[in-house]
Amino acid sequence: MSQTWFETDIAVRDGRIVRIGYLKNVSSDVVIDVKGKYVVPGFIDMHNHSDISIIAFPEALNSLMQGVTTIVIGNCGFSAAPVLPKSLNDVKRFWSQLSLGISVDITWNSFDEYLRTLERIKPAVNIVPLVGHGTLRINAAGFTDYLSSEALGIMKELTVDAMKSGAFGISTGLIYPPSSYASINELVELAKIVSSYGGIYSTHIRSESHKLLDAVKEALEVGLNARLPVEISHLKAAGRSNWGKVREVIDLIKKYREYGVEVNYDIYPYTAGSTSLTALLPQPLYKDGLDKLISKLSDKEFREEVIKLVESSSDWENLLSILRWDDIVISYSWSCKSCEGRNILELSRELGKNPYDIIFDLICSDQGRTLMVMHFMSEEDLIYGLKQPYSLIGSDSLVIPPGIGKPHPRFFGTFPRVIKRYVKDLGILSLEEAIAKMSSIPAQKLRLNDRGIIAPGFKADLVILDIKNVEDRATFEDPNNYPAGIDYVIVNGSVSVSEGEYVKIRNGEVVKNPATLDIS
């Protein structure tokens, strides 16, 4: 849903838009003169991983300064809840792979207790939660590849509890153990529960490279069989030999939409991805847990076995089969700050080590906390995916302040980059199309019935753009920079960013699935 701009006044009261029209004679305590600028709905980040970091950094500045007023968390199978007492250490280790060294005290067990924790810290942005399949599976069966009927029953109970507590759906991360061990039958069983509560199935598919089409089809089959909307996470065709496959993916999506499956995908405006360095390790090796795997990596003979497995097998999403050594850049290291911003080939030559040993050494010394950036996508695929009516925007980032490593620039620049590069510079999208992909379309996908558009009665989540000056300033070399041209950000009627500066007002809400609440 997009609408051409028009000149008007907007009145806000008690957190909601109350009038739109000529309001010159209406009095107000606060008046913002935005003549010559654009007022647009607050941006909705469809793919975010701030489940833990939002507790440490509730100001959410890197999101807020981009114009983001709502983040969707719990993606890729990683949610911060539920956490059964017996599974606390495993859940913490699971999360340590993505958390940039950020840790908080986990004081909750249930999904509802976690959401209450978020409400207490009063975040600066609205939070829309998903429950993560990986977290559910760890609670039921640890990191093992085997799932008993009893363990599946536990997962189902936890899923029901999360949905009743207000989750908007379930997410999977099918390249990350233990989610990677799940069968499609397991996914459908859980998705059917989510469907009964009006939720969505959001998935980091099983392969984004050689088996991309099979992986997309699996996701669509889950949607078809469980009868629920599907959101494919950060759509891409990874690896040079797979470039061009996004067109085939779109054809497949069109086919399943004709079958009645509501399919969308989120995308970020960069040709590089980012994840844990541990994602380079063969998935079958995780069966005894991350700690045991890391301890084995200090053994030379085990390293040789790992290398042999990597170079002879592709039964899992083998990222090293599509990456060159100079495609892999260390973005965060707990133990080697001088490694940040440098690629594996460069480090290998400087240190006189085999590239594999560079990777293994970092994983061991960082205890699995290392993050990497991977340069492995084509802009032609990105543009084709972005242009389709099914695409939404997601940053695939965490809320963090500047200075934590050299993260992917999407942490600080995703939303203004869509406008700067793909609207203003290349003309791939109209401004109206871009804004819709960042606001009304994700709101519609999530059934956020009072957010995502500017209309009377809707929540006053608003962004004021100085469109001529909107640009992302985060680069791969220097990512810790806020964008320009985002003049005001209003969250639930309160100004949180004024004239490009944070004014220390946190007025976000924990949003709960209205369909879920109606049922419960």
Image (tube, helix red, strand yellow):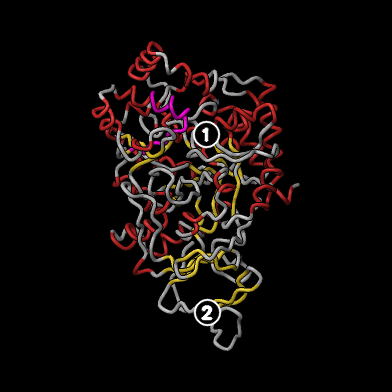
Q: Is 103 or 11 nearer to us in this picture? A: 103
* Whole-percent x, y for residue 373 in the image: 36, 39
The mark found on residue 242 in the picture is: none
312 relative to 231, above or below: above
- Identify residue type, mark 2: Asp
24 relative to 362, above or below: below
Label 1, secondary structure: give it.
helix
The mark found on residue 9 in the picture is: 2
**284 relative to 124 in the view: left or right:** left
Residue 310 lies in the magenta stretch: no
Q: Which residues are magenta?
A: 361-374
**206 relative to 322 in the view: left or right:** right
Q: Which residue is mark 1?
A: 96
Residue found farthest to the right? 520
Label 2, secondary structure: give it.
strand
2 or 1: mark nearer the eye: 1
* Whole-percent x, y for residue 120 in the image: 68, 52
Residue found farthest to the top? 301
